[in-house]
Amino acid sequence: MALYAELHRHLGGSVVPRILWRYFHRSGSEWSEQFAEYPEFEDFYTRPRKTLDEYLELHTLVEKTQTLDTLPYFIYRLIRGAYVFENLAYLELRYTPYLRTPEEYSQNDRIDRMAAIVEAVGQASQNHNYSIITSQILCTHSRLPDEVNRAIVELAAQMPEYVCGIDLAGGDAHYGDRLSELIQLYEYARSLGLKTTGHLYETHEGCYPELLPYLMRIGHGIQIPLHYPHLLPQLARQGQCLEVCPTTYLKTGTLDDLSELKIVFDRCFDAGVDIAICTDNAGLHNVRLPFEYENLLTLDIIDFEQLQACQDASFRHAFAWPYPEHPASLLTGLLQNEPNPNLTPALT
Ligand SMILES: [Zn+2]
């Protein structure tokens, strides 16, 4: 029996279209009038966008619905789906807590309210009957002020019971003007003992080698093997792992065809750089993790052995997986042992 780890999933993009559409109708949202029937909504919600920025606009639609009151509703359904349909044993959920606080409040008030959001996400992630280990990654954001980003980093350090690391999100084309500020932000995070990932080398505009030394994992990073392969030995030496999310690159217009990922996987395997295959926004894409795996196999981008290597890498690079082994090896040992007569139903 295989159980998987998901390292890169956004809370905003994790709501599958049917759950969101039903929520709009149950809550009497204006969206329920615009999309009276489900198929039109699914088409609107999941269709590819031309650029990463246009794609990220959709996140704001979901962020506005995810408030302190509604988060348990969405997270319960997310965990249920991840357990039943995706065989997840481990899930790192990422989001920007500031963007779940009420817009009408002042910046300081919104900062003060972030801890309650992290607490609500943490409680909802643990308060269910599904056996999944979860933790949160708090996303700093390329379009938020430095003061807010530093408060997010501090909050991550203050709530280790719920938070396992920090991320940098918001579109990697917007880092350039703030590079020294972002470097200081990561230095601050590392000084607090936080684990780090960051959206980097996702698109042509997001290639900043200056940020690489601060990251334990790289969110996407596909431009490195595609266009800067000379950096791969450095990544291998530092034990950095790429979080590759195949469907995203089609939805954002970053790649024209998934076959381009064959170069990404081949060059990383050759250089000894680990890859964790992830979904990024499983709900927004309407593509769950096992289908990402199957798709890569079907397209001959990787073989089964390479898939297993990536699945193992996901557990090795997980920030909060508490065991030395991945769960499949624990279960295999259990299932291959001599049957215990006390556990075997008597034949009559
Ligand atoms: Zn992402």
Image: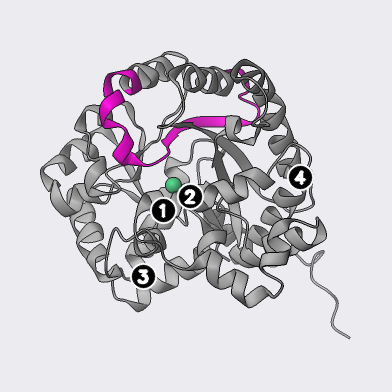
Secondary element type, mark 1: helix
Q: Which amino acid does the dot numbered 2 rest on?
A: Glu
- Residue under label 1: 54
Secondary element type, mark 3: helix
Quadrant where the C terminus is found in the figure: bottom right
Mark 1 and mark 4 residues within 8 Å of each other at the beta carbon: no
Q: Which amino acid does the dot numbered 4 rest on?
A: Thr
Badge 4 residue CB within 8 Å of ligand 1: no
Quadrant where the N terminus is found in the figure: bottom right
Mark 2 and mark 1 residues within 8 Å of each other at the beta carbon: yes
Mark 3 and mark 2 residues within 8 Å of each other at the beta carbon: no
- The answer to whether residue 300 shows anywhere in this view is yes
Q: Mark 4 Cα within 10 Å, few/some/many (few <14, many 20+)?
A: few
Residue pictured at 39% horizontal, 19% vertical: 185
Q: What range is drawn magenta here? A: 158-182
Q: Mark 2 Cα within 10 Å, few/some/many (few <14, many 20+)?
A: few
- Residue under label 4: 70
Residue 1 among those drawn in magenta: no
Residue lying at the far bottom in this picture: please name it. Answer: 348
Q: Mark 1 Cα within 10 Å, few/some/many (few <14, many 20+)?
A: few
Nearer-N-terminus badge (3/4): 4
Of 135 and 326, nearer the camera is 135
Answer with the quarter of the image where residue 304 lies: bottom left
Of 7 and 334, nearer the camera is 7
